[in-house]
Image (cartoon, rainbow, N blue to C red):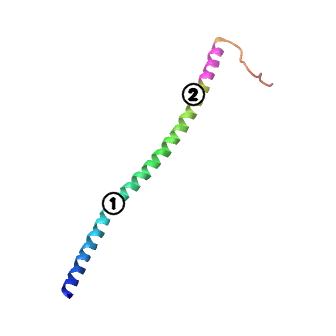
Amino acid sequence: MVFIRNNKIQKMKHLKRFWHWLLGKTTIDEKIEAKVDEVVEEVKERVDRIKEEIADVKEAASEVISQAGDVVDAAKGKKRRGRKKKK
């Protein structure tokens, strides 16, 4: 009986070793998933920041377009519109 009991213990030890080895292999996948999640979050933040900057550039470009019309009018010799200069 003692021999059979020790055999079962040996099998359990082998089974535990295999289980720990298997768990050790899955942590690599978990680390990869965590890294991918980090990268995805960083990319999302960058995309949001780029959208903000594009909106700023769009606003500035529309201002440049309206100012370009004033330059054309000045080249034609028209007087400046808007508030008069203070002396």
* Residue 19 at x, y percent in the picture: 29, 69
Packing grade of label 1 (10 A; few <14, some 14-19, many >=20) is: few
Q: Is residue 51 above or below residue 27?
A: above
Q: Quadrant of the C terminus?
A: top right
Residue 10: which quarter of the image?
bottom left
Magenta span covers which residues?
Answer: 65-75
Magenta stretch: includes residue 72: yes
Residue 3 placement, left or right of 43:
left
- Taking the spot 28% from the left edge, 65% from the top edge, the residue there is 22
| Whole-percent x, y for residue 32 in the image | 36, 55
In this picture, is 48 found above or below 39? above
Q: Amino acid at mark 1?
A: Ile
Tag 2, which secondary structure?
helix
In this orientation, which residue lies closer to the viewer: 8 or 82? 8
Residue 68, quarter of the rendered image = top right
Where residue 14 sits: x, y (%)? 24, 74
- Which one is earlier in the sequence, the residue at label 1 or at label 2? 1
Taking the view exactly as shown, the residue that stands out farthest to the bottom is: 2
Residue with the mark numbered 2 = 61
Q: Name the residue beneath numbered marker 1.
A: 28
**Can you say which quadrant of the picture contains the N terminus?**
bottom left
Q: Amino acid at mark 2?
A: Ala
* Foreground: disc 1 or disc 2: 1
